[in-house]
Amino acid sequence: MSSLKGRTLFVTGASRGIGLAIALRAARDGANVAIAAKTAEPNPKLEGTIYTAAAAIEAAGGKALPMMCDIRDEAQVQACVQKTVETFGALDICVNNASAISLTGTLETTMKRYDLMHQVNTRGTFLVSRTCLPHLLQSKFTPHILNLSPPLSMKTKWFENHTAYTMAKFGMSMCVLGMAGEFKDQVAINALWPRTTIATAAVNMLGGDELMKASRTPEIMADAAHVIFTRGKDFTGNFLIDDEVLRSAGVTDFKRYQVDPNIEPTPDFFVD
């Protein structure tokens, strides 16, 4: 696999979890990483801030730019993307990782929560992509947009228990479907989703220690993203599953990604 040395990534929600793991994997190659996330002050319920993430990225061998950014705010997104380009001279990869989740039924989903999920997931992804695209189109490398969103599977079972959340996540995937066609041969635009639950703060909130132990680590998503970023512009419009991407790159040992090697990982949503 080729290196990401010298490339600049703009990663939303990169203060922890999958976003940070993707940033760290790129940093080991010597990449530049703009961390666009909301957490600047330590939170007892959530591990990591934009500053701890920046320190980890620098320690891994990359260059970091920590920025407070609410991706619901167009002015903040524009300012952060502009600062990224001014700092590193270019923008080569956009990772839409930031997401909001509420696995609630229709009657239990308040409109405030509905709006949050759609503003962060669907609208935020569209806004960040739209703002990054003029710079991606000028990249001297193969430019990429990667949305952490699921395959578009129009089956009742993926909607019936949490319609609002599914709509918001599928909105991110629809951005891939449309933009990959719109920017064909110019920018590689793909979606990546885990086959199993991933040990993140969101999964811990949903299922506690028990579900965390029955999950894979964020590193499997980071390694899969790295494979995607080293492919050409013709690799676009794909809805990818993490272990399938790695298997295509020759990886056969997935047990090393399990939090507990003795517990079989729990299947994630949206994977048929």
Image: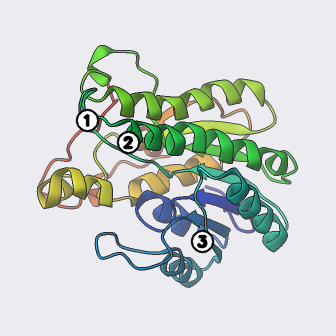
Furthest residue toward front: 111
Q: Residues within 10 Å of mark 1 (few under 14, many from 20)?
A: some
Q: Position of residue 213 (x, y in %)?
A: 17, 58
Circle 2 — which element? helix
Task: Name the residue located 48 percent from the left edge and 56 percent from the top edge.
Answer: 223
Q: Residues within 10 Å of mark 3 (few under 14, many from 20)?
A: many
Spatial CA distance of label 3 from label 1 is 37 Å
Quarter residue 268 falls in: top left
Task: Name the residue located 67 percent from the left edge and 43 percent from the top edge.
Answer: 127
- Of tags 1 and 2, which is closer to the observer? 2
Q: Amino acid at mark 1?
A: Thr
Q: Tell me: 232 left or right of 200.
A: right
- State if disc 2 and disc 1 touch (CB < 8 Å): yes
Quarter residue 193 falls in: top left
Marked residue nearer the N-terminal end (3 or 2): 3
Residue tagged 1 = 104
Marked residue nearer the N-terminal end (3 or 1): 3
Q: Position of residue 132 (x, y in %)?
A: 75, 49
Circle 1 — which element? loop
Q: Amino acid at mark 2?
A: Arg
Which mark is on residue 113? Answer: 2
- Of tags 3 and 1, which is closer to the observer? 1
Q: Amino acid at mark 3?
A: Ala
Which mark is on residue 27? Answer: 3
Task: Name the residue located 28 percent from the left edge and 70 percent from the top edge.
Answer: 45
- Of tags 3 and 2, which is closer to the observer? 2
Marked residue nearer the N-terminal end (1 or 2): 1
